[in-house]
Every structure is written in structure tokens, then in C-alpha cells.
Amino acid sequence: MARINLEKIKHSYSSAAEGVQEYALKEINAVWKDGGSYALLGPSGCGKTTLLNIISGLLAPSEGKILFDDKDVTHMSTSDRNIAQVFQFPVVYDTMTVFDNLAFPLRNRGFSEAEILPRVNEIAKMLELEDSLKKRAARLTADGKQKISLGRGLVRKDVSAIMFDEPLTVIDPHLKWKLRSKLKELHQRLGITMIYVTHDQTEALTFAEQVVVMHDGLVVQTGTPVELFEHPKHTFVGHFIGSPGMNILPAENVNGEIGFAGNSIKIASVKAPKNIEGKLEIGVRPEFIRFDNDNDPNSIPVEITKVSDLGRFRIVEVKHEKQLIKLISPEQDIIPSESPRIIFDADKTRLYADSWVVN
Ligand code: ATP
């Protein structure tokens, strides 16, 4: 197992990279602790696979260094880095039994059969494959085959890290949840550094201790699921995490008072905003907006345009002037039928300048 340091990693697929837009990775700096579980989360094209391939050694970065503990591995091969990988689609030998598939990475490294037997049995038990060990892999369903792939990634104790690249893509939706929880449990039991790439926030948030949010070739925030929800450092994180995501509203700074469409907005985390420059935006999650029942002077008049009832809560879409705002209204709250007004929770409302949070 290893601590992974990424130092000023940049990557361009074109050799004559001119200007920052040419870079698939613009500059990544990170320290991922030994034994931690990390998810690289971001939309298609943000650079997740490029970063994963650089860490595993399938790709050499155009600039920067990768250290495993204090050893520079930037130009080492995947096998010398001692990385196990699990890909989107199962990598199994159909003609071999499940047991032999799981034993393969150990036999390849010269482990004795006496060492292999208990380890394969242990991993098979964790993945609930113990009844299939004697079957040929070809006889398993796609889910079963992907479990074998997971098992082959997990079976070696001596790896620096295990990398998962969207490993649940081919898994049936109802089994996804089960396997995700299983992976989390396996991480806790085995304590191996795990890096999991996905564009699915539920997968990232349920699996990882630390979620690394990527956007346009950059890591915009690394944090626990709660940190990403409550303190998004970048508007992209606010919008991408959450369902629905954070409302991002145009803001103005009038002599140190933050306003939205002429309404004064209280933001507890920003004390003296006189000198703030750049494009200003207010971020507030739908969970932290409510209808005003007390004629609060800071409330904003709105028009209700849509109510979606999801059982325990409703997602209400309202408009102030032309701006659409979403709020989550708990089942027991009354949605006003006349002259509705909304109010933002000042403690949970954030100010952003050029997309980055102002503290
Ligand atoms: P996805 O989830 O779709 O796999 P991703 O977040 O993993 O996306 P990457 O595959 O790392 O993103 O791609 C990052 C950028 O680099 C994209 O603009 C992509 O088009 C570009 N890219 C990726 N691979 C290559 C390649 N082999 N040659 C040229 N450009 C590439």
C-alpha cells in the first residue's frame, strides 16, 4: 500500500500544446493517504481516465511527478508500480473456473498453492462467489463475471493501490447498490488504498471517504460527502453534487451589501464584501430555501411554476423575475397559494466570485 502524491501533473494529448485549453489535465496537485478510499468524480471528458491512466502507469504525464510514498514512479511500468486494476467490462478467462480466475494474479506472482487457497476462499466469500468456485467463468452472468474481476483486483495483499474505472457499468441496477456497499466494506476490511472513477455521484458518495471532484482538467474540490454538500468551494461542485443541485443566482455588490435582482441577501460566511471583484454569484441549495410565513423583510416574492411530489418532500420550482429557483419543501410544510415569498438560510448561503467561494 502506498501514499500517492501528485505533483504539478499536466497532460496534453497533442505534442505542440499551445495555451491552457489544449491540456486534458491542467495542473493536478494532490496527496492521497495510504489506505484511503477516493472517488474521482466528474462529467464525461473532465480528465478522470487520463488521471487514472497516469497513476497506473498506462500513460506518462506531459509534466509533473507521481510519488508512491517517497518513490518517484512517474516513468515506471504498471507492473513495477504494483497496481491492481478493475475495468468497466469484466476481464475474465471464460474457460477457467472461478477459482482459477481468482488465483491467477497470485500464481502469476509466484505465490504457493498453500498461500493461494485461503486467500481465494476469503475473497470469494466476501464477494459471495464461494458456491461458484468450481464453475467455469463462462457460466456466470455479467454481474457474476464482474464480481470475478473485482475479486482479481482484490486478491493480492501486496498491491500499492487498486484502481476501479467505472466498475459497476454492466451491473444490474438493483445489484449496483449491493456491490457498492460490498466494496466499501471490503475497503474497511482490507485497508488497501482504493481509487474509484465514476461520473455517478451516488456511487462516489457511497463508496469513498474522500471525493475528488474534477471539472475541465482540474480538481475543483476534495472533501467528504458532507463537506461537498455543505461547503462547495466552486459553483461546479454546488451544481454537480445534489439532486437537484445548488441554485446559482447572479449577484451584485452594492456598497458592501450582496443583492440578487434588487433583493438584499444575507450571507453569514461573508463579513465585509466591499472589495470583492469578479463575476459574483450566490449559491444556495434547494434544501436551504423555505417559504416565508413570518413576513420576513428579507424574503423574496416568487411565482410557483411547478411542484413535483416525491412522497416525503416536494421539489418546487419558482421564478423571481426571469430567474428559476428550486427549493425542497418537506411533506408537512404548506405551499402558499397566494403571494408566495421565499427566504434563504443565511448560514447555508454562499457567495462566489468567478466561480470560487468567497469566505
Ligand atoms: P469519460 O467519462 O467519458 O471517460 P473522462 O473524464 O474520463 O471522460 P478523459 O477520457 O480523461 O475524460 O478525457 C479528457 C479529455 O482528453 C477529453 O477532452 C478527451 O477528448 C481527451 N482525450 C482522451 N483520450 C484521448 C486520446 N487518446 N487522444 C486525444 N485526446 C484524448
Image: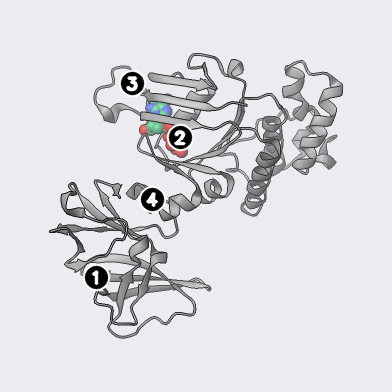
The residue nearer to you, when weighing 353 against 359, is 359
Q: Earlier in the sequence, mark 1 or mark 4?
A: 4
Look at label 3 and name its amino acid.
Ser
Residue at mark 4 = 232
Question: Which amino acid is tagged 1?
Answer: His
Q: Residue furthest front?
A: 271
Pointer 2 local density, CA inside 10 Å: few below 14, some 14–19, many at least 20 = many
Q: In whole angstroms, how far apart are the C-alphas of marks 2 and 4?
A: 20 Å
The answer to whether the beta carbon of the residue marked 3 is less than 8 Å from any atom of ligand 1 is: yes
In the image, taking residue 205 as reference, residue 246 lies left or right, namely: left
Give the vertical position of 78 relative to 208 (above or below): above
**Of pointers 3 and 1, the one earlier in the residue sequence:** 3
Residue picked out by circle 2 = 48
Q: Which of marks 1 and 4 is in front?
A: 4
Specify whether 341 is left or right of 84.
Answer: left
Q: Which of 132 and 71 is in front in this view?
A: 71
Alpha carbons under labels 3 and 1: distance apart? 46 Å
Secondary structure state at the residue bearing disc 1: strand
The yes-or-no answer for disc 2 within 8 Å of ligand 1 is yes
Q: Position of residue 168 (x, y in %)?
A: 60, 43
Q: Looking at the image, tell me whether mark 2 or mark 4 is earlier in sequence order.
A: 2
Mark 3 highlights which residue?
14
